[in-house]
Image (cartoon, rainbow, N blue to C red):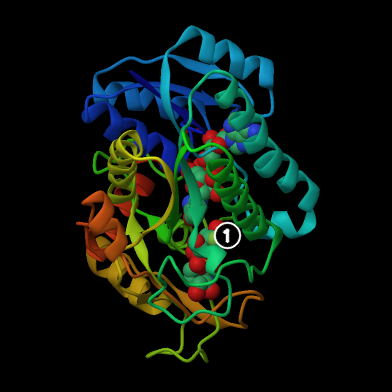
């Protein structure tokens, strides 16, 4: 029994490879290295002490996928492969629809052909859009998204749901991630963004290490306790463990379930800056800047469904997240390069 991990060389994928191996699963990984470095999987092998097959393969390449499925008995797919930069998706929507949506359609087609009908999909809290109050629950309306990236996630959720309706043998878990941060506690693998980071934690750590001068806090006039945006930050290792539980679940059930992976607790931008300073002992200079278009004031999960269906709960706190992000950043100032 093997689990195929698409995009397994990326940030969340590499951490999930370790947790899947630790849980005793055999894995097969594919990635096209568009946003990752082979060094990540080398380190996954070191950390886990296990070897596994890897294929440099694009999810839009049906023949390449067929070769992978023919070479291995794949029981389920954890599907991370996708593009994720919100701003880039606004500038290049067709690239995002092609890679994320068409890529998923090609992957599902080959899976159906090869008789593998279980998928864990990387969705996002972004599908809840702007209209819902936090805590966000899975049965709230989705689709009022603010950018093409979010639309790809919403569209793929719909496509996978339609697939389950068409064929009752399919089993799909739509995991709606909140804000993954942190790194493996070894400091050997972590998030390695290209260029200037878009997201808060990599920006904070690059300011702390001296690569960037100052954090811009996007808005201090939100309707939140300190006026800065509130998010549900979740440690990437907790998130990775959620995937192991989701695979266990998908093997025993059919149909489609959307499940939040979050902690249920919101922290503001300044909370995160303060927690980071406390655990690292390093100052993070910041200035208040205008709001970033498309941002909501508050976004945090109701994680009860994950506890009920998957038996999963986030265990690490915000200090763990900051400490592990800092260890990764300070031990690898240039990322994997
Ligand atoms: P990442 O960019 O680090 O990992 C994605 C991996 O997929 C990369 O290694 C990339 O090279 C690969 N990839 C992209 N397109 C591919 C293709 N066509 N064929 C094969 N490989 C391809 O991103 P991540 O943070 O690990 O995110 C993983 C998934 O989780 C993505 O689908 C992302 O949209 C989703 N997600 C991420 C976040 C977040 O904040 N990190 C939040 C919600 C959802
Ligand atoms: N922020 C700053 N300065 C920065 C970066 C971010 O103040 O330099 C603030 C944002 O305004 C927001 C908070 O920090 O209040 C978190 O911002 P991130 O960019 O880290 O995360 P988002 O919540 O905006 O978006 C993330 C992912 C999206 C995903 C969304 C919901 O980047 O892909 O969570 O899951 F869709």
Q: Is residue 161 left or right of residue 249?
A: right
Whether residue 279 is situated above or below residue 156 in the rendered picture? below
Q: Residue tagged by mark 1?
A: 198
Q: Quadrant of residue 114?
A: top right
Residue 103 percent location from the top left of the image: 66, 35
Taking depth in this image into account, of 216 and 85 the one nearest to the observer is 85
Residue 298 visible in this rendered orientation of the protein: yes
Quadrant assignment for ligand 1: top right
Residue drawn at (39%, 78%) of the image: 270
Of the pair 68 and 240, the residue shown nearer to us: 68
Which one is in front, 243 or 320? 243
Report the front residue among 236 and 329: 236
* Figure quadrant of residue 76: top left
Q: Is residue 51 left or right of residue 214?
A: left
The structure residue drawn at horizontal position 27% and vertical position 61%, both measured from the top left corner, is 280
Please provide percent x and percent y for residue 97. Answer: 73, 47
Q: Is residue 273 above or below residue 73?
A: below
């Amino acid at each position: 029994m093997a689990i195929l991990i698409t995009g397994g060389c990326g940030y969340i994928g590499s951490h999930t490879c370790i947790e899947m191996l630790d849980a005793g699963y055999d894995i097969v990984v594919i990635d096209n290295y568009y946003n990752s470095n082979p060094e990540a999987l080398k380190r996954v092998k070191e950390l886990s002490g296990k070897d596994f097959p890897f294929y440099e393969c694009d999810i839009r390449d049906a023949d390449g996928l067929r070769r992978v499925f023919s070479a291995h008995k794949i029981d389920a797919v954890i599907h991370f492969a996708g593009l994720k930069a919100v701003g880039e998706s606004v500038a290049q929507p067709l690239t995002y629809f092609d890679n994320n949506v068409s890529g998923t359609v090609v992957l599902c087609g080959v899976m159906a052909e090869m008789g593998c009908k279980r998928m864990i999909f990387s969705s996002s809290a972004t599908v809840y859009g702007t209209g819902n109050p936090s805590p966000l629950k899975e049965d709230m309306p989705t689709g009022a998204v603010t950018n093409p990236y979010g639309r790809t996630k919403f569209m793929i959720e719909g496509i996978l749901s339609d697939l389950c309706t068409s064929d009752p043998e399919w089993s799909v878990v739509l995991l709606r991630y909140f804000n993954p941060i942190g790194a493996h506690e070894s400091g050997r693998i972590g998030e390695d963004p290209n260029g200037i980071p878009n997201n808060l934690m990599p920006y904070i750590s690059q300011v702390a290490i001296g690569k960037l001068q100052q954090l811009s806090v996007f808005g201090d006039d939100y309707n939140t306790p300190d006026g800065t945006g509130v998010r549900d930050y979740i440690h990437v290792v907790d998130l990775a463990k959620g995937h192991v539980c989701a695979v266990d679940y998908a093997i025993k059930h059919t149909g489609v379930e959307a499940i939040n992976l979050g902690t249920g607790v919101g922290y503001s931008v300044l909370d995160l800056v303060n927690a980071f300073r406390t655990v690292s002992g390093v100052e993070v200079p910041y200035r208040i800047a205008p709001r970033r278009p498309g941002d909501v004031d508050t976004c945090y999960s109701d994680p009860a469904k994950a506890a009920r269906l998957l038996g999963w709960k986030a265990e690490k706190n915000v200090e763990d997240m900051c400490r592990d992000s800092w260890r990764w950043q300070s031990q690898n100032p240039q990322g994997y390069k």
